Image (cartoon, grey):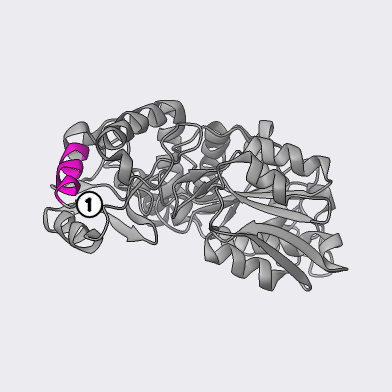
Amino acid sequence: MQANDFYLPSQDYLLSHSVGRMLKSAQDDFNNQFMAPWQQLNQEPWQQWLEGIERFRLALAKLLGGRAGEFCPQTNLSSGLTKWLMSVPDFQQRKVKVLLSEHDFPSMGFVLQQALQDAELTFIPDSEDMSCLDTWQQHLSAEYDLVFVSHVYSNTGQQAPVSEIISCAKQQNTRVVVDIAQSAGILPIDLHAWQADCVVGSSVKWLCGGPGAGYLWVNPQRVSECKPKDVGWFSHQNPFEFDIHHFAPHDTVLRFWGGTPSVASYILAGHSIDAFAQMGSEKVRAHNLGLLEIIWQALSPWCMSPQESSRCSGTAIIHPGKQLEACAQALKAQGVAIDVRKYGIRVSPHIYNNHEQVTRFVDTVQRFVD
């Protein structure tokens, strides 16, 4: 894939941590996979639509190192996490002690507070470095039933050492959930190597697949232990049995699926994810790091995010000092698409960005640094 394969504005778009750009081929693919069967067939189009969802699962497996049968489509991360938490029998019978970070996306904290009947949440303070294994080792102990890990923290640009955290948690007999919303497509991921208990993700950011196409991965060794409460006919081992007196949960992660599924979002996302899977996350990451290096070399003193490949996400966070607001306004006035969070200006160069765009960003920021 190259820049001209995407719909891009005439100005500089550096917001892939929020919404990735759409592939030019997506519309024709969507028409063929979703609209045409609906328009033209003299029968219900479910067979063709479900093939589109299966393509979505296959693309995820190719990209993330699992198997297609280990992924269950979900509307978003909150839905997937809620379903998994409510399915673990142990979590319904006693107080569940959870370790997470103040840097985690708020939606995940809301779910952990509400989906568990009796939860005690302990937050690693936002003053601590979530990319440092020592931070996790100092907090993680056998008292916790569950640790929630964001592979990437969106407001700090930090990358958590997921493999090492999972290893430490397993030694403590602590379950692990990993959020890959901000890392899928930009950081190489191997779910089988990780062996987390549960992984939740989405397609809207680096994967350029649009909203509504989330996914839930559950460790296949533990799926049979899960007893989902939010179910429907697509959670059934045989959805077309049509016997209201008999529910047999699917023997795979599809037991979490629920009722009649959405289709359009997964067809859109499946097309994009497959393209990124064919390219490989390593190539996308190499391009990203090359552009981040331009920012680090020019703006290192004002960079609030890590500047090492093993610790940084795909996002650089720059705080120019007292003129932060003026700098952000100047960037937007020049057509540089950025956003601002607690620690500064966020920029995320993707495969469709280039040296000239990042250099324009740097040149503008340098006018405002203290």
**Residue 232 seen in render:** no
Relative side of 269 to 261, left or right: left
Return the residue nearer the eye: 34 or 235: 235
Q: Is 339 located above or below residue 164 in the figure?
A: below
Q: Is 103 located above or below residue 158 in the figure?
A: below
Residue 148 spot, x, y in % from top left: 66, 54
Q: Is 46 located above or below residue 57 in the figure?
A: below
Q: Amino acid at mark 1?
A: Asp
Q: Is residue 188 magenta?
A: no
Position of the N terminus by quadrant:
top left
Residue 33 spot, x, y in % from top left: 41, 46
Q: Is residue 365 magenta?
A: yes
Residue 225 spot, x, y in % from top left: 84, 52
> What residue is drawn where x is 79% and y is 41%?
170
Relative side of 70 to 347, left or right: right
Count of marks overlaid on the render: 1
Splitting the image into 4 quarters, where does residue 164 fall?
top right
**Residue 33 seen in render:** yes
Chief secondary structure of the magenta portion: helix
Splitting the image into 4 quarters, where does residue 260 fall?
bottom right
SS for dot 1 = loop
Q: What segment is highlighted magenta in the picture?
A: 358-367
Relative side of 261 to 203, left or right: right
Q: Which residue lies under the disc numbered 1?
A: 370
Classed neighbour count for the residue bearing mark 1: other residues with Cα under 10 Å, few (<14), some (14–19), many (≥20): few
Residue 84 spot, x, y in % from top left: 71, 58
> What residue is drawn where x is 17% and y is 52%?
368
